[in-house]
Image (cartoon, rainbow, N blue to C red):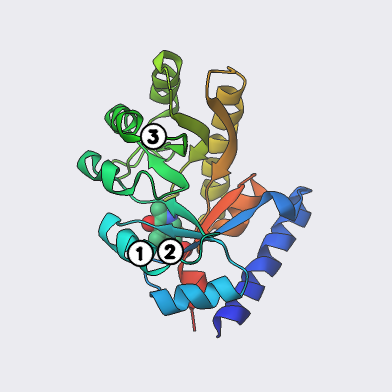
Amino acid sequence: MSKQANLTQIKTNIKEACKKAGRSEADVHLVAVTKTIDVAGIKELYDLGIRDFGENRVDVFLEKYEALQDFSDIRWHFIGSLQTRKVKQIIDKVDFIHSLDRASLAEEIEKRAEKPVRCFLQLNVSGEESKHGFTKESALVFLKQADFKQIEIVGLMTMAPITENENDLHDIFHALNEAGVEIAALHLNRVTASELSMGMTNDYSIAVEEGATYIRVGRALVND
Ligand SMILES: *Cc1c(COP(=O)(O)O)cnc(C)c1O
């Protein structure tokens, strides 16, 4: 299928999930994950109205950022695991970091950022050892002692396990939503935590039903 047809299908699915959950579609932002899409493909998506693009590797992000500098209304989302020593290469170029997964990374962002950076705190809700991120408990400890000058914790992010079990997926996304509500209620300085970055090609409908405000979709945009 064309990118346009894929996009139409994704939007229909978002709409249905919103309807099921009694949510407004306006609250769900589609981040087009372009790790397998080249610059020409990104331009195609741009022409279809997409403005939010997500990359997970610093080197590839920098190449595409350079190539697309004239498209000044693009919002870049860094979604991949980020090495501390690479923070300075991207910090003034990205609009959102979805993968703030450890205290040492937060320290480096604080040190390098010259203007506020919107970050999602990454939680490992499923408890899989291979996954990065805070547990809810360690997130609470971290946030309560943090004194952010530049970081704004706009929300929480998680990656669900690869599974066909829809109940498990509902549980994981629901748990992230509840963690967000709990953290937001603390009213900590620079921690609004009102957004939820969750849902990928395999599970974004379920994530939207559970309150996702940013879904990160790659393969569904390029499927034939
Ligand atoms: C690749 C990736 C996605 C998109 O995954 P798809 O299955 O292609 O939709 C979302 N989030 C992160 C962190 C990724 O690395």
First in sequence: mark 3 or mark 2?
A: 2
First in sequence: mark 3 or mark 1?
A: 1
SS state under label 1: helix
**What is the spatial separation of the Cα atoms under label 3 and label 1, in whole angstroms?**
20 Å
The residue type indicated by label 2 comes to: Gln
Q: Which residue is mark 2?
A: 69
**Coordinates of residue 118 in the picture (x, y in percent):** 49, 38
Q: Is residue 182 above or below residue 214?
A: above
Residue at position x 45%, y 77% in the image: 41
The residue type indicated by label 3 comes to: Glu
Q: Which residue is mark 1?
A: 66
**What is the spatial separation of the Cα atoms under label 3 and label 2, in whole angstroms?**
20 Å
Q: Quadrant of residue 45?
A: bottom right
The residue type indicated by label 1 comes to: Glu
In the image, is 103 to the left or to the right of 180?
Answer: left
Is there a contact, CB below 8 Å, between mark 3 and mark 2? no
Q: Is residue 189 above or below residue 107?
A: above
**Coordinates of residue 186 in the picture (x, y in percent):** 58, 17
